[in-house]
Amino acid sequence: MKNLIIIAVLLLALPMAAMAIQTQSYGWEDGNTVLGTYGNANVGLSMDPVHGGSYSLEFWESPYGGTPQAYVGWIKGLSDGDTVMATFWVYDTTPGTNPSGRIWAHWNDDPVDPNGYNGSAGGNSDYSAGTGWSELSYEWTVADGHTGIIIEARIYAAAEFDTIWIDDLTIEAPDAAEIVFPDIPVALERSTWGEIKSAF
């Protein structure tokens, strides 16, 4: 009887172990920017505004058109039924109008190329509030055999050089998954007049 109780306890513990979650954070303090971009996306590092630490990701649209995306996180090694949650802070000061930020994602089942694309994973219907820093988050459930997901910051602009800032990204994923943060060093920074200049 004692052995049966021990086996029952172990069997109950297995699903809990399989569902263990890791949480990792990224704040653009290491000099890197994004994993990749789509559309008319331009990125750099900024010391003002920042939500935490010393730097944020500056994200602007040029030329104007489309919905530019900055790839800020990549979760690999996923299985159907896994959940991934991502949260980041967006800075904009245009309430009720653009530019605005949004959290979104797409499936990427290529384990080596961050630019792989296997369909939209959707995201939050909410936009940044336009009153300074606002927090955006969303949870995705893996299905249809997907093994990876790219977390996107999206900008919805009204004109060329419209800008938002992203900071303090947090990702929750299964322990068995691999979380990858930006690894492209900053090369360009936008001046206040919309000109591109060397950052270093």
Image (tube, rainbow, N blue to C red):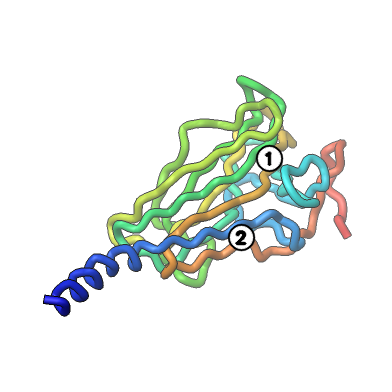
Which of the two discs, 1 and 2, sits closer to the camera?
A: 2
Given the image, on which type of amino acid does mark 2 rest?
A: Leu
> From the viewer's perspective, is residue 89 above or below residue 141?
above
Whether label 1 touches label 2, CB < 8 Å:
no
Q: How many numbered dots are placed on residues in this image?
A: 2
- In screen coordinates, is 35 left or right of 45? left
Q: Nearer the viewer, residue 55 or 104?
A: 55
Q: Looking at this view, is 80 or 156 the one in front?
A: 80
How far is the residue under mark 1 from the one under mark 2? Answer: 17 Å
Kindly state the secondary structure of the residue where label 2 is placed: loop
Mark 1 or mark 2: name the one nearer the start of the chain. 2
Observer able to see residue 50: yes
Measuring from the top left, give residue 53's x and y in whole percent: 76, 51
Q: Residue 142 at what x, y percent from top left?
A: 34, 55
The residue shown at (64%, 45%) is 40
Side of 37 relative to 86 (left or right): right
Measured from the top left, where is residue 72 in percent x and y? 59, 54
Q: Quadrant of residue 144?
A: bottom left
Q: Characterize the local packing of mark 1: few (<14), some (14-19) or many (20 or more) Cα atoms within 10 angstroms.
A: many
Q: Which residue is mark 2?
A: 35
Residue matched to label 1? 61
Quick one: which residue is furthest to the front in this view?
2
